[in-house]
Image (cartoon, coloured by chain):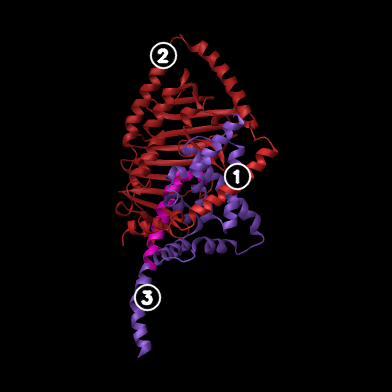
Chain colours: A red, B purple
């Protein structure tokens, strides 16, 4: 029996195919109409404007005002166009190298403390993703590997387990090694890098002693937290690699402080986006290293087949 | 939005997605009446938050996420009263009235999965959600969903194969046993 046969059997058992399902929908419709009718007659619908969102709008307005001031100072000033061109050059160079290999360390801090983090290494079609988050669901230090088209994961008490090989994964299921790789590389590789740097405005420049150059400006939250989703029934915006954008970052039009650090070699070394207030300060950082020179992850030596379970 | 527009939008939403939410609440709830309550709660929440509800497929994902939360609340409120709750849920949900042989195997294979594996597998295979949409419903990373889905599919296949082999052995042995018993 192949994998498709078992999944086809599962799909045939879908409750929608059971006799009486249409009647269940009809009954549910009656119940819903009764509940909604009562609610509509008893009170107005909830049209609350969450306080956090209101604060976000206020903050966004303040940031916009600040950005306008910044723009007045930077437009026409010598070097502004150079800064934009330099960041784009660095992004192009980095993105080309990132197509081959790289390491990206993604961190979100809140009031200076680590909130969530992931380290990703990739080379060609091989990939390693490690969770470094101290307080997220799941296990800090848990790792997922894709090596030579095989997916490996760590299971508690069992160690490394082979989770899938190309012959038993349906193309288009969203879970093939190639699909993993495409999703991760889009999040941390060239596409995101180009989009963030391309969206930065009001650039100014400083040069620390280590030979790097830091370009600072603002970027619309929607350029970074592009994905939308729902968590516990609430609409959310999501940063690359699945982290929920909190406070102002959830408002796509809010302008967030951003900085791109270009190393002495001309490649992007770090992207930092920060927002919030002194009472609740957030920072999202992606630090790149080994672009074009990161070694491939290796398959775990003693990985067990999943079937042993 | 005027009252008429609200009602029009709500009716369109219900017409589009009621069967999805009825199906989902059906296999997630412990009884038909709980499922019906959950569906009503979900659409009541949708009615109250209609202005915030996104259009199109994102609205469908919102309904799934809300349904999941409603059912979780139902379970929490009952957990203290019923220590065998999870087991009852499984039996009520996955044992159909008169299952065919294949359906019985599927339900038994599902019963052998952990709750997390089962939920992610059924959101994909029965509800037709993508890994990204499942991540939105569960409130976790898409990459995590992909991993869970991998594992769940493999485990389901393994369980289904084992059960099929047992079923096959039994069907071979049954006639012989009848002959032996009659001799």
Name the residue that disc number 3 marks.
B170
Name the residue that disc number 2 marks.
A81
Residue A263 among magenta residues: no
Gap in angstroms between the C-alphas marked 3 and 1: 49 Å
In the picture as drawn, the residue positioned furthest to the bottom comes out as B183
In percent of width and height, residue B164 lies at 37, 67
Quadrant location of the N terminus of chain B? Answer: top right
Q: Quadrant of residue A249?
A: top right
In percent of width and height, residue A254 lies at 54, 25
Numbered circle sitting on residue A33: 1
Q: Is residue B114 visible?
A: yes
SS class of the residue under badge 1? helix
Q: Residue at x 60, y 49 (%)?
A: A31
Quadrant location of the C terminus of chain B? Answer: bottom left
Magenta-drawn segment: B134-163
**In the depicted structure, whether residue A11 falls above or below residue A72:** below
Judged by depth in the image, the label closer to the viewer, 3 or 1, is: 1
């Amino acid at each position: 029996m192949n994998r498709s046969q078992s999944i086809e059997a599962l799909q045939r058992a879908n409750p929608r195919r059971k006799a009486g399902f249409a009647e269940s929908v009809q009954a549910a419709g009656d119940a819903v109409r009764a509940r909604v009718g009562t609610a509509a007659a008893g009170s107005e619908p909830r049209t609350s404007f969450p306080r956090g969102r209101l604060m976000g709008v206020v903050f966004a307005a303040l940031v916009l005002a600040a950005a306008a001031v910044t723009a007045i100072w930077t437009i026409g000033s010598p070097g502004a166009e150079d800064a934009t061109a330099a960041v784009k050059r660095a992004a192009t160079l980095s993105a080309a190298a990132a197509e081959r290999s790289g390491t990206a360390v993604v961190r979100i801090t809140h009031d200076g403390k680590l909130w969530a983090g992931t380290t990703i290494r990739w080379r060609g079609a091989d990939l390693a993703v490690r969770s470094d988050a101290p307080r997220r669901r799941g296990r800090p230090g848990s790792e997922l590997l894709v090596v030579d088209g095989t997916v490996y994961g760590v299971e508690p008490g069992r160690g490394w387990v082979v989770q899938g090989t190309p012959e038993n994964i349906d193309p288009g299921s969203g879970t093939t090694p190639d699909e993993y790789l495409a999703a991760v590389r889009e999040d941390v590789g060239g596409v995101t890098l180009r989009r963030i740097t391309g969206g930065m405005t009001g650039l100014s420049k400083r040069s620390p002693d280590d030979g790097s150059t830091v370009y600072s400006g603002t970027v619309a939250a929607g350029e970074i937290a592009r994905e939308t989703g729902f968590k516990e029934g609430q609409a959310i915006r999501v940063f690359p690699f699945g982290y929920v954008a909190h406070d102002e970052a959830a408002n796509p039009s809010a302008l967030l402080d951003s900085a791109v650090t270009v190393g002495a070699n001309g490649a992007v070394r770090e992207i930092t986006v920060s927002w919030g207030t002194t009472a609740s300060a957030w920072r999202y950082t992606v630090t790149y290293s080994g672009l074009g020179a990161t070694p491939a992850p290796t398959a775990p030596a003693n990985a067990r087949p999943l079937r042993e379970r | 939005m005027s009252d008429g527009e609200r009602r029009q939008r709500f009716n369109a939403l219900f017409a589009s997605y009621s069967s999805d939410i009825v199906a989902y609440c059906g296999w997630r709830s412990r009884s038909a009446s709980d499922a019906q309550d959950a569906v009503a709660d979900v659409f009541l929440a949708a009615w109250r938050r209609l202005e915030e509800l996104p259009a199109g497929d994102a609205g469908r994902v919102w309904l799934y996420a809300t349904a999941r939360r409603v059912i979780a609340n139902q379970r929490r409120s009952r957990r203290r009263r019923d220590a065998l709750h999870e087991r009852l849920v499984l039996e009520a949900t996955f044992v159909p009235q008169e299952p065919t042989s294949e359906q019985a195997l599927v339900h038994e294979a599902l019963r052998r999965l952990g709750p997390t594996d089962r939920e992610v597998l059924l959101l994909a295979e029965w509800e037709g959600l993508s890994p990204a949409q499942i991540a939105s419903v569960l409130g976790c990373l898409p990459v995590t969903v992909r991993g869970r889905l991998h594992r769940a599919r493999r485990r389901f296949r393994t369980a289904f194969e084992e059960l099929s082999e047992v079923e096959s052995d039994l069907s071979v042995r049954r006639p012989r046993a009848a002959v032996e018993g009659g001799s």
